[in-house]
Image: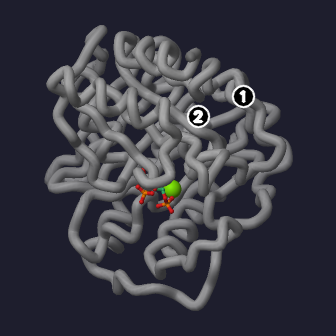
Amino acid sequence: MTEIFEAIKRSAIRIRYAIENDDTGYSQNQNSTGDIQLKLDIKSDMIIEEEFSLVKSVKELASEEKEHVEELCKDGKYLIGYDPLDGSSLADVNLSVGSIFGIYENDYSGKNLKASVYVVYGPRVELVIGYENRVELHRLNSNNEFKFIQLLNLNQKGKLNSPGGTQKHWEKHHKEMIDDIFADGYRLRYSGGMVPDLHQILLKGGGLFSYPATTDVPKGKLRMTFEVFPFAQIYELAGGSAIDGKGRLLDLIPEHIHDTTPCFFGSNEEIQRVKTAYGK
Ligand code: AHM
Ligand code: MG
């Protein structure tokens, strides 16, 4: 596992350089979700593939930017599901973006997720690892080395609310729940990038991030393999919860690597509110 974390760190340093120096415009290509890819999406994907191709324990890659899985080392043990540059359309307005990695064994189901990592490219570059029983925060220093900073844990209840999805398409029970949360004094924090939004909630001790099913997108927007499962594991290991409205996100099994799901990540009190609202 250490050599996988090291490959992610090397990728992150190269991606950071590309974000700072490359063109933030669109390419001519579409990804399998139908999004037009940015040149930075393609470059970040290529960097990650290059770095993982040096790691013998990596059997296969599944990328948000690739239609099909890609076999690397046939005797490898791990499958990596990753989003090379999540929130990439925020790079041209200089907001934070991120990379997300799930390290799986056998298949891309939540229960076979062994470790999760994300990187936030913001004013500073930070890397969070969820592995075994803990969540670690690392930060890139001026020598281009990631240094361990601290363990991360969520409080039982937080103060921040990040409600995703187009509001005019929210279901009635979802809107009522979000209104209730704000009526209790929670503050709005939503940048449009799940990496910085979930990172903020994690570092500030708690709150709720939601990307629900909506009338226009009934299965939600965020993808299980590359985005949802890694954050679900990190939130659970930090002492919080992650559900789809009914049950635990990590109990889901995608039929296809690009499958999406409604998702809620947060500290336990806020997730209890979601269960109550969705149980109605
Ligand atoms: P992307 O993988 O195409 O960048 O999309 C994922 C992003 C998440 O980071 C973010 O939470 C969500 O899309 C925002 O969607 P919306 O613009 O609907 O709020
Ligand atoms: Mg994404």
Q: Examine the rendered structure and indicate whether residue 121 appears above or below residue 17.
A: above
Question: What's the amino acid at mark 1?
Answer: Leu
Q: Along the polypeptide, which appears first: circle 1 or circle 2? A: 2
Q: How is the image coloured?
A: one colour
* Cβ atoms under marks 1 and 2 closer than 8 Å: yes
The answer as to whether callout 2 falls within 8 Å of ligand 2 is: no
Crowdedness of circle 2 by 10 Å Cα count: few (<14), some, many (20+)? Answer: many
Q: Residue furthest front?
A: 172
Residue positioned 76% across, 56% down in the render: 72
Exactly how many numbered labels are in the figure?
A: 2
* Left or right side of 117 for 24: left
Instruction: Name the residue located 38 percent from the left edge and 65 percent from the top edge.
Output: 14
Q: How crowded is the residue under tag 1: few (<14 C-alpha within 10 Å), some, or many (20+)?
A: some
Q: Which residue is mark 1?
A: 252
Q: In the image as oriented, which residue stretches furthest toward the bottom?
A: 28
Q: Is residue 11 visible?
A: no
Label of residue 229 in the image:
2
Q: Quadrant of the C terminus?
A: top right
Quadrant assignment, res 204: top left
